[in-house]
């Protein structure tokens, strides 16, 4: 989501003739797009902003913008007080009004048209936001507080954005939102929206991120079965394998229901890759609860799992982390080891099979299942090729173009 917001911000600068540089010494403006999903992200943002003091001293005419979720949480008043050299603070809820801040600092844009160059993923992959915010109340999560309740964009707005990005050369679209499959705008449900996007000329592959286990239905399963351009990969955060912890987290499903759901999705799309997120050390998580999460890794046959140490996002005493950091580290390590072992098994199952690969360079691309694929030669940016998989190592398949 933040990457997608950064794309929008970069586009607003490009309309004013700016170009992107990785070298801060060459920059005339700096944008710090912040995250606060875990405390570590917020801490990183703070130290990044702190480091800009020297930059600003050397070029008082340079502009510093602090935007996003940590900016929303901490507030403009606090940030400008602590870092007086910051020119503008734009919280996540006001990110759509970033243009107003730009006008204040740099004047109006001479151009109205936005170019659709993608800078954060490969040029052939474009993000399209379909919803903002989240109306869930997962107990550990700060997102609803900093991004606000769920708001769905109209299908017209989604299609216009997708169309423009395809016209600019994108081959793959990633529909974005906190609970994308909860999408509903008047009569347009998630599956109907997907159907419309799938009809756009130039589209080779459609992904979405992230869905919530509560919102998949028969209509989606039917669409998945029928539409090969829908990626054979779903990132579906499970968070825990313990029913007690899932309940405390207010996730709305049990581990059994989650596993049944991915079994149904795999029935609709044989070979579907499923990746997930887990949190370890949620308050009250016992060794037994943690073992349920370890068991889930095997049962889910996940291609990948992002694992996080629980990070308290409120001051409520009952939400404090109740495990010593040593134990948190220990569980995280054991979980990561289980995930690594399991994903290698999943990867190895692909050997000898054909993968549809969208290439980003001559020898690197991504399979429909989101696996990274390497070949010796023959690929070209934006080209879809069939690759016979010969081997697997460290999250990457290798093979030969057919
Ligand atoms: N502590 C640890 N991990 C968290 N996530 C969200 N909130 C927290 C938290 N307070 C994780 C979840 C989510 C991912 C984006 O970040 O796993 O799916
Ligand atoms: Fe946070 Fe996702 Fe739960 Fe929304 S659904 S509250 S974004 S974890």
Image (cartoon, grey):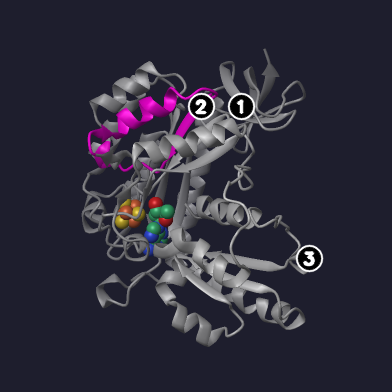
Cα distance in 3D space between marks 2 and 3: 37 Å
Q: Is residue 342 visible?
A: no
Q: Is residue 71 placed above or below 56 in the rendered structure?
A: above
* First-in-chain label (2 vs 3): 3
Q: Would you say the residues marked 2 and 1 are in contact, meaning their CB atoms lie under 8 Å apart?
A: yes
Query: Horizontal and vertical percent for residue 183?
Result: 30, 40
- Residue 360 in which image quadrant: top right
- Residue behind mark 3: 26
Report the side of 348 relative to 327 (left or right): right
Dot 1 crowding, Cα within 10 Å, few <14, some 14–19, many 20+: many
Label 1, ligand 1: CB separation under 8 Å: no
Residue 358 image label:
1
Dot 3 crowding, Cα within 10 Å, few <14, some 14–19, many 20+: few
Q: Which region is colored magenta?
A: 186-215
Q: Secondary structure at mark 2?
A: strand
Quadrant where the C terminus lies?
top right
Q: Mark 1 against mark 3, which lies toward the viewer?
A: 3
Residue closest to the eye, 181 or 165: 165
Report the side of 170 relative to 149 (left or right): right
Residue closest to the eye, 388 or 113: 113
Q: Is residue 5 visible?
A: yes
Q: Secondary structure at mark 1?
A: strand
Q: Is residue 191 placed above or below 120 in the rendered structure?
A: above
- Residue behind mark 2: 205
* First-in-chain label (1 vs 3): 3
* First-in-chain label (2 vs 1): 2
Query: Horizontal and vertical percent for residue 372?
Result: 61, 33
Cα distance in 3D space between marks 1 and 3: 34 Å
- Give the residue displayed 62% in from the left and 73% down from the top: 64
Magenta-span inclusion, residue 200: yes
Query: Horizontal and vertical percent for residue 164?
Result: 53, 36
């Amino acid at each position: 989501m933040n990457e997608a917001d950064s794309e929008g911000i970069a586009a607003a600068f490009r309309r004013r003739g700016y170009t992107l540089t990785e070298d801060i010494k060459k920059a005339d403006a700096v944008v710090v797009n912040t995250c606060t999903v875990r405390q570590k992200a917020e801490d990183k943002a703070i130290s990044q902003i702190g480091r800009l003091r020297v930059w600003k001293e050397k070029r008082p005419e340079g502009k510093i913008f602090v935007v996003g979720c940590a900016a929303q949480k901490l507030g403009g008043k606090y940030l400008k007080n602590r870092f007086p050299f910051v020119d503008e603070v734009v919280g996540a809820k006001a990110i759509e009004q970033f243009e107003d801040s730009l006008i204040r600092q740099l004047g109006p844009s001479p151009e109205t048209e936005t170019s659709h160059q993608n800078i954060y993923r490969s040029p052939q992959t474009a993000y399209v936001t379909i919803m903002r915010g989240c109306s869930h109340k997962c107990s550990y999560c700060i997102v609803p507080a900093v991004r606000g309740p769920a708001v769905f964009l109209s299908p017209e707005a989604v299609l216009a954005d997708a169309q423009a990005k395809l016209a600019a050369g994108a081959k793959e679209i990633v529909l974005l939102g906190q609970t994308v499959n909860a999408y509903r705008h008047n009569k347009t449900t998630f599956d109907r929206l997907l159907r419309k996007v799938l009809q756009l000329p130039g589209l080779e592959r459609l992904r979405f991120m992230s869905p919530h286990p509560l919102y998949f239905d028969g209509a989606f399963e039917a669409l998945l079965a029928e539409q090969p351009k829908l990626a054979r990969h779903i990132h579906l955060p499970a968070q825990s394998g313990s029913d007690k912890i899932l309940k405390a987290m207010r996730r709305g499903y049990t581990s059994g229901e989650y596993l049944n759901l991915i079994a149904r999705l795999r029935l609709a799309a044989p070979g579907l890759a499923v990746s997930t997120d887990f949190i370890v050390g949620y308050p009250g998580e016992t060794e037994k609860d943690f073992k349920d999460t370890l068991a889930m890794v095997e049962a889910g046959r996940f291609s990948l799992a992002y694992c996080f140490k629980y990070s308290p996002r409120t001051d409520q005493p009952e939400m404090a982390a109740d495990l010593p950091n040593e134990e948190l580290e220990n569980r995280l390590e054991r979980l990561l080891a289980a995930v690594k072992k399991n994903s290698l098994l999943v990867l190895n199952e692909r050997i000898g099979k054909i993968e549809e690969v969208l290439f980003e360079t001559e020898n690197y691309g991504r399979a429909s299942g989101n696996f990274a694929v390497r070949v010796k030669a023959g690929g070209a940016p934006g080209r879809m090729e069939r690759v016979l998989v010969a081997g697997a190592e460290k999250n990457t398949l290798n093979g030969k173009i057919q």
